[in-house]
Image: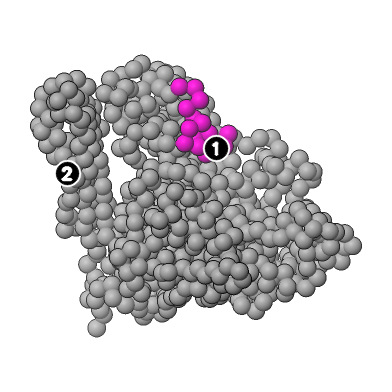
Amino acid sequence: MGYFLGVDTGGTYTDAVIVDDAATAVIGKAKALTSRADLAVGIGQAVDAALAAASVRPDQVTLVSLSTTLATNALVEGQGGRVALLFIGFDAGDEARAGLDEALKGDPILRFSGGHGHAGQELAPLDLSAVEAAVAALADQVVGFAVAAQFATRNPAHEIAARDLIRRVTGRPVTCSHELSANLNGPKRALTAVLNARLIGMIDRLVAACERHLAAIGIQAPLMVVRGDGALISAAMVRERPIETILSGPAASIVGARWLTGAQNALVSDIGGTTTDVALLRDGLPEIDPMGARVGGFRTMVEAVAMRTTGLGGDSEVHLITQGLLGGLRLGPRRLVPVSLLAVDHGPMVHATLDRALAADVSGEFDGRFVIPMQGNSGGLTAREATLLARLTQAMPMAAALTSRLEVAALERLVARGLVMIAGVTPSDASHVLGRLSAWDAGAAEKAMRLLGRRRNGAGERFATDPAALAQAIIDQLTQQTADCLLEAAFAEDHAFADEAPEVLARHPILKAGLARHHGVMEITARLAVPVIGLGASAPSYYGAVGEKLGCQMILPEHAGVANAIGAVVGQVSQRVSGTVTSPSEGRFAVHLAAGVQLYSERDEALDALEAALVAEATERALRAGAVDVHLTRTRDLREADVEGRRMFIEALITVTAAGRPRVAHADAPAA
């Protein structure tokens, strides 16, 4: 008998589960802390413990599937490696569209003449000698390149030429926009390509870490990765297209929620260390976002489940609001390393630092905060950033790391690049103070909470004199923000409110009164009308209060803490490709293919030629992605118009989807 191994690597924990080969039961499960310095350590600990719990030998594993929130977390937190964008044939100012300039965050953009027109004709030649000189100068300063050319989905020749040159000259990974989407809107495709290039190093390290441990213990099964739409893709393909793993973890959690509960209609809410991800199950299936995945404020061209991802989790940064007399709290969107977790590995340093701060009469700006250096590409740093990074040789108090206020901005930049992490007070620390969690150092959490409570509000009074009171206030704030996330998702899916912003409706005073069962001159009641499936290791700690606030049924399944890992091994392999036929003039029909534009004199002949090419491409990609027993679905979306009594063809979009079950290894017979 063979077994399936599911692995989910999150910002805080890595989970592993063993499922029988019929995908009907969980045989064993385990959790381990995600090891940022070497992801293989956390993966190995979780996998080995799950195998032991299930009494399964490595050679009995026939399929391994991986889901992750690392890519999602990086975009939500604004992190990732430094990249360069080649912007070919676009006008000045086009980078301001679709949030592209915000996504670049000062990373280099190289502009060149070139690109193609709507019909695929070359508008201007691409100067490859200028491209070579520009990229060679940047090779050591970036982790990869993104290439976007005008109307590359109509003719990708310039993107392909630039890609081949960059690979030859620099050896760095290159992402072309036409490889990620067949849709128009060049700046949005460029944004997607930039984010993909930024994630390549991170996802490559994850896949390599998983492969390294599997090989070390003798698992020879195929390795798959969950895409953002819940389908599976081979590890080799995801290394080229890591952007497809944004919302991988959330998509896997939805698949896992359906498998665990059998629910047909429910909101699925998955709380992790960094994010809370909410999606609607309707008739047992999640919706696919027709506008493309939206993560961290960026709208991409990646097909993914319709998910609302918010920077709110057990390890979210706690902000004290000092405006007004009483002040308040806000959580997220950045993830911090909880002080209680940092103290597990650096106890003497953490406790000594906290004790010194508590003994002082005056609170310091950086009390209770620490910095932790991480590995990564440090090219393109300013002199101040490089000097600060060189000083951070180990985990240390933030106050000791900074020599002046001028270095605060440099530190923030290093955090955004993923070269440094910050430790501070989080809801996880609050849970330790309240006795809800005991896995880490509760004493360090209590000291850090006491320091945070000494801060002053607008009235000059301390925020809290009792650490437990401040900890409860943090948990209450987590409950409120989680409820807001769920209400936003509910209003977004309720078509009766399509004309109103879900963010506004979720916080409307009348709704708040209704949830509180207001009874005065007016009587107002409101509740969430579908159950909520709470997922994540901390869901049992937090979600009971959320259900009470929203007046809804809260479902907390037995294996809620490893739902992502379960979802990773119960999905299918699926590949979807699209192509376009246009009509540049009457009686001429242009088929836009990766190899170039092909012209036909008959509409149906052009449509059939495109569909045949897409069938071949989708089938090849599905097989390369690890599918067997492939079946195809085809759709044709024709746009025509009546002009002076005649039916005129404008363009057609053809989509072909190839799907099948994942290929599994042959399981050896059990030893006698």
Q: Which of 268 and 641 is in front in this view?
A: 641
Secondary structure of the residue carrying numbered label 2: helix
What's under tag 1, amino acid-wise?
A: Glu
Of all residues shown, which one is farthest toward the right?
361
Residue in view at x 16 percent, y 58 percent: 629
Q: Earlier in the sequence, mark 2 or mark 1?
A: 1
Of labels 2 and 1, the one closer to you: 1
Residue 142 visible in this rendered orientation of the protein: no
Depicted 655 relative to depicted 136: above or below: below
The residue stretch that appears in magenta: 91-106
Location of residue 97 with respect to 466 vertically, above or below: above
Image disc number at residue 102: 1
Q: Quadrant of residue 439?
A: bottom right
> Farthest front residue?
521
Vertically, is 449 above or below 606? below
Which residue corresponds to the image point at 65% horizontal and 74% vertical from the top-left?
432
Name the image quarter holding residue 638: top left
Q: Residue at x 32, y 69 (%)?
A: 264
Q: In this view, does 46 lie to the left or right of 37?
A: left
Dot 1: what SS? Answer: helix
Q: Mark 2 points at which residue?
A: 615
Q: Can residue 339 be seen in this view?
A: yes
Assess disc 1: are there few (<14), some (14-19) or many (≥20) residues with their C-alpha within 10 Å of its C-alpha: some
The circle drawn on residue 628 is none
Amino acid type, callout 2: Val
Magenta stretch secondary structure, dominant:
helix
Q: 289 or 190: which is nearer to us?
A: 289
